[in-house]
Amino acid sequence: MQLSDRVQKMQGSPIRKFNPIAIAAEEKGKKIYHLNIGNPDIQTPPCYLEAIKAYNAKTIGYAESPGDVNLQDAIIDYFAQYDIKLTRQNVLVTNGGSEALSMAFNVILNEGDDVLIPEPYYTNYHTFVTASGGSVVPVQTTPENGYEWATEAQLEAAVTPNTKAIVCITPGNPTGRVMTLDEMKIVGEFAKKHDLWIIADEVYREFVFDGKKPTSLGMLDDIADRVLIVDSISKRYSTCGGRVGILVDRNPDFHDAVMKIAMGRLCVPTLEMIGATELYRLPMSYVDSVRAEYEARRDVAYEELMKIPGVVCQKPGGAFYMTIKLPVESAEDFLIFMLEEFEDNGESMMFTPAAGFYATPGKGIDEIRIAYVLCQDDIRRAMELLRLGIEAYKNR
């Protein structure tokens, strides 16, 4: 028996690849500071569980395929704060942002279609695109210029005759890069010129720093029919395990098509939608407080990184990630060293090697991604361990 060609083209997650080595180190008594995965430590708002506990129906039946109407209405009110006017026919509730992405690519891609994605990019995009019959075509960037990508020259250099869509992850994972509204307009004009869909992955929308205002590709009315917005409760509300995402579209043909898939998978879990409704009703002041904490964590991480000779890193503008070029030949080999050989007072730290975030072979082998999702003291210590680890690694 044979497996499908599609699944054999997929790659495993570089984010989880080294977990067994870390677990083995911890079982031997070593403390590991985990900056390898975007799993926030900020408390989930209590209203989420309170709403679920208050549910008193005798039976938990199927929900409607588009989502619970109360949650849809809360999402509509949330987007109205950005002057994005939606109706329930524009909002599909999904099993996490991952299902929203998978559905979107399944609707718009034919076998052999290309999707432009600035690299480095969230690694699971390769899985979603490949499973839908498409191929990832990278838009080239460099760490030296802060992974800038939204220029006409870079986009035109990447487009192919088979290009069907372009992905905008803003604020970015794994780089923390934030698109400006002007850059969004450049992408919009490019998409209109080449008749492309735009996948707007905005799950970190409010996590923008240094006084910047959150923006959305949904704010550009002239491309409303080609923009597919992905959102989620995972990061904004520290509810990764809640697995509630949304897919917003303002294209009736797309919506009719995606509903075929939504009905086929039946629905999103009822209780999680009840909790998510209360999250979307939280005032923006809650998000402001969370953003301030992540900005402070970024500042700590960046301050400590700048003490390491040979590091290349531009201060990221948002999300809670940064991608860093290290003075080592192989980030993977260095990570194994950090987990298996290095320790300082019984402690070490863990990051994600960045090669898996690239489509171009050979790129990113000396780069890492860190997720600054720990408290400020732990981040400072983890960056100290990174510095000490590099020194020990180079002096072996």
Image (spheres, rainbow, N blue to C red):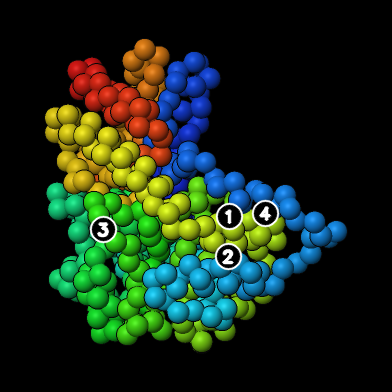
Callout 2 amino acid: Thr
Q: Residue furthest top?
A: 345
Q: Which residue is mark 4?
A: 51
For marks 1 and 2, the one nearer the N-term is 2
Query: Nearest the camera: 114 or 348?
Result: 348
Tell me what residue is drawn at x 41 percent, y 39 percent: 373
Within 10 Å of disc 1 (Cα), the crowding (few <14, some 14-19, many 20+) is: many
> Mark 3 touching mark 1, by CB under 8 A?
no
Callout 1 amino acid: Arg
Q: Judge from the rendering whether residue 67 lies leftward or rightward of residue 132; answer left or right.
A: right
In the picture, which quadrant includes the C terminus?
Answer: top left
Task: State the image quarter where residue 96 is shown.
Answer: bottom right
In the picture, which quadrant includes the N terminus?
Answer: bottom right
Give me the C-alpha separation between circle 4 and circle 3: 33 Å
> x%, y% of residue 44?
54, 45
Disc 1 element: loop
For marks 2 and 3, the one nearer the N-term is 2
Q: Which residue is mark 3?
A: 212
Tell me what residue is drawn at x 19 percent, y 52 percent: 146
Tell me what residue is drawn at x 32 percent, y 85 percent: 222
Within 10 Å of disc 3 (Cα), the crowding (few <14, some 14-19, many 20+) is: few
Q: Which residue is mark 1?
A: 243
Give me the C-alpha separation between circle 2 and circle 3: 29 Å
Disc 4 element: helix
Q: Which residue is mark 2?
A: 94
Q: How many numbered callouts?
A: 4
